[in-house]
Amino acid sequence: MPRILITNDDGIYSKGIRAAVEAVKDLGEVYVVAPLFQRSASGRAMTLHKPLRAKLVNVPGAKVAYGLDGMPVDCVIFALARFTHFDLAISGINLGENLSTEITVSGTASAAIETATHGIPSIAISLEVDWRKTLSEGEGIDFSVASHFLRRITRTVLEKGLPKGVDMLNVNIPNDATPETGIKVTRLARRRYRPTIEERIDPRGYPYYWIVGRKCEKFEPGTDAYTLKVERKVSVTPINIDMTAGVDLKEVERLLRSGL
């Protein structure tokens, strides 16, 4: 059977990762390695200055599951060292959408990017949520529709592989989606948030700072953000991890030489 690695950035006790396991457990042999704690917005951070601890966790449907006191990328590295190879990697189901070029900030997307660098077809999947109704670790969230689409996409990738030039898929599910909701292949929006700093004063009169993000409200048609937020469709963005600009490299070289 195909070997499937599942990870996330919300932590191994998140309902989202358990929904992912449930969705694909009969499509392959499922291994889970995920952070023990919430690691959202960790990007491709790795733990290099202290040892990692791993804990066996019971995750129904998984052949084996480890919780790691590290980052999502640490989990991928641990899994590859421990279990050698995988035919597919899934990161999610994440609590909250991961859109635009800012997916490089996301621990969920970055875990899939990491597995893709090892030549493993990868899927990052996220579910839009209403944070006013969300409790810790996804309590109160219905993952059934996201699980439905994850299963469909996983089966297709296992059977047919990813198209040439595609290393991973970044999938976003609207919170009001049904199994009949349309799927649209998209490109990344430029930005989803515009981060800034909010200064506050502590009880002793010293300033401290929060990084906060102001949401962009207008998106170009054809982008993942427009598809999810305006068209209310499932967005699937094919990602190539080679970020080299698709331009004539000789032209860039001539431009640089002209200024020397």
Image (tube, rainbow, N blue to C red):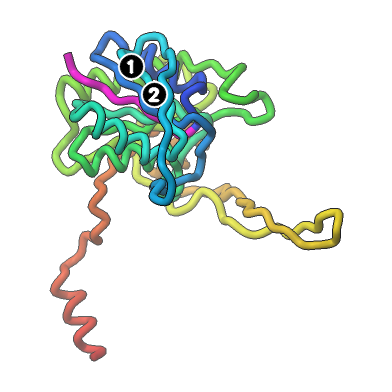
Q: Position of residue 63 (x, y in %)?
A: 30, 13
Q: Which residue is mark 1?
A: 64
Q: Residue furthest front?
A: 51
Q: Which residue is mark 2?
A: 66
Q: Position of residue 103 (x, y in %)?
A: 42, 45
Q: Secondary structure at mark 2?
A: strand
Amino acid type, residue under disc 1 in the picture: Val
- In terms of image quadrants, where is residue 32? top left
Q: Please tell me whether residue 58 is drawn above or below residue 36 in the rendered image.
A: above
* Quarter occupied by the N terminus: top left
Question: Would you say residue 233 is visible in this rendering?
Answer: no
Region of the chain picked out in magenta, as a range = 1-9
Q: Nearer the viewer, residue 76 or 159?
A: 76
Q: Residues within 10 Å of mark 2 (few under 14, many from 20)?
A: many
Contact flag, marks 2 and 1 (Cβ < 8 Å): yes
Q: Position of residue 246 (x, y in %)?
A: 21, 60
Q: Position of residue 186 (x, y in %)?
A: 34, 40
Label 2 vs label 1: CA separation? 7 Å
Q: Residue at x 23, y 14 (%)?
A: 28
Q: Please tell me whether residue 123 is drawn above or below residue 107 in the rendered image.
A: above
- In terms of image quadrants, where is residue 23? top left
Q: Secondary structure at mark 1?
A: strand
Q: Nearer the viewer, residue 119 or 242?
A: 119
Q: Residue at x 80, y 62 (%)?
A: 206
